[in-house]
Image: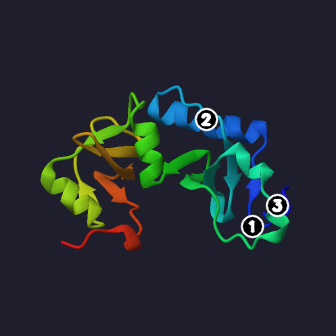
């Protein structure tokens, strides 16, 4: 573990392979990343540049590091909005296209009652060329995980 990173764990190659395998399985894409992966509390996954090793982290009080990519739980990855934008461009399955009205509901924080056309588990929500995060397909609904602080008020 790097000094100054007591809140995070640097993922080893086996753990990185598990994250990449989850992406490949869930979204049918060939994902790769040249940087590093950190795991925070509750399975939060962050992407970082390998250049972070050049910093004197011992002298810094670090509250946040890298790009929040998603959260691993039960061998499934729930992508953040930014994670969906990275993976969504390559995804071959579990991508749900939304209408204008559905998109407004989604970014407002509402679950969507929508036929998810064979999607299972976590799906990426897309509107035109924009990716709006990841939701869980369950019981005829797509459950919304957009954080309250990131929701757009209507």
Where is residue 112 shown, x and y percent of the image?
Answer: 25, 56
Q: Earlier in the sequence, mark 2 or mark 3?
A: 2
Q: Report crowding for label 3: few under 14, some 14 to 19, many 20 or more residues within 10 A (C-alpha).
A: few
The quadrant in which residue 13 appears is top right
Q: Is residue 121 visible?
A: no
Rounded to the nearest angstrom, the CA distance separating label 2 from label 3 is 24 Å
Q: Is residue 95 visible?
A: yes
**Residue plotted at (47% across, 54% down):** 80
Residue closest to the eye, 93 or 52: 52
Q: Give above or below for 63 relative to 137.
A: below
Name the residue carrying label 1: 7
Horizontal relation, residue 67 to residue 81: left or right: right
Circle number at residue 56: 3
**SS at mark 1 in the image:** loop
The quadrant in which residue 55 appears is bottom right
Residue closest to the eye, 54 or 152: 54
The quadrant in which residue 16 appears is top right
Name the residue carrying label 2: 33
Q: Report crowding for label 2: few under 14, some 14 to 19, many 20 or more residues within 10 A (C-alpha).
A: few
Q: Earlier in the sequence, mark 2 or mark 1?
A: 1
Rounded to the nearest angstrom, the CA distance separating label 2 from label 1 is 22 Å
**Residue plotted at (15% across, 47% down):** 99
**Residue plotted at (78% across, 63% down):** 5
Q: Give above or below for 149 relative to 133.
A: below
């Amino acid at each position: 573990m790097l000094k100054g990173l007591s809140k995070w764990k640097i993922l080893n190659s086996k753990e990185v392979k598990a994250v990449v395998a989850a992406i490949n399985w869930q979204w049918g894409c060939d994902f790769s990343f040249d940087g590093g992966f950190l795991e925070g509390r509750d399975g939060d996954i962050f992407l970082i540049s390998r250049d972070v090793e050049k910093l004197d982290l011992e002298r810094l009080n670090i509250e946040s590091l890298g790009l929040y990519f998603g959260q691993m739980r039960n061998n499934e990855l729930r992508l953040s909005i930014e994670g969906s934008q990275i993976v969504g461009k390559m995804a071959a399955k579990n991508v749900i296209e939304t209408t204008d009205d559905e998109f407004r509901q989604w970014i407002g924080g509402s679950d969507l009652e929508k036929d998810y056309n064979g999607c299972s588990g976590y799906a990426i929500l897309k509107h035109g060329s924009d990716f709006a995060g990841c939701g869980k397909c369950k019981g005829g609904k797509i459950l919304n995980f957009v954080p309250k602080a990131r929701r757009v008020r209507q």
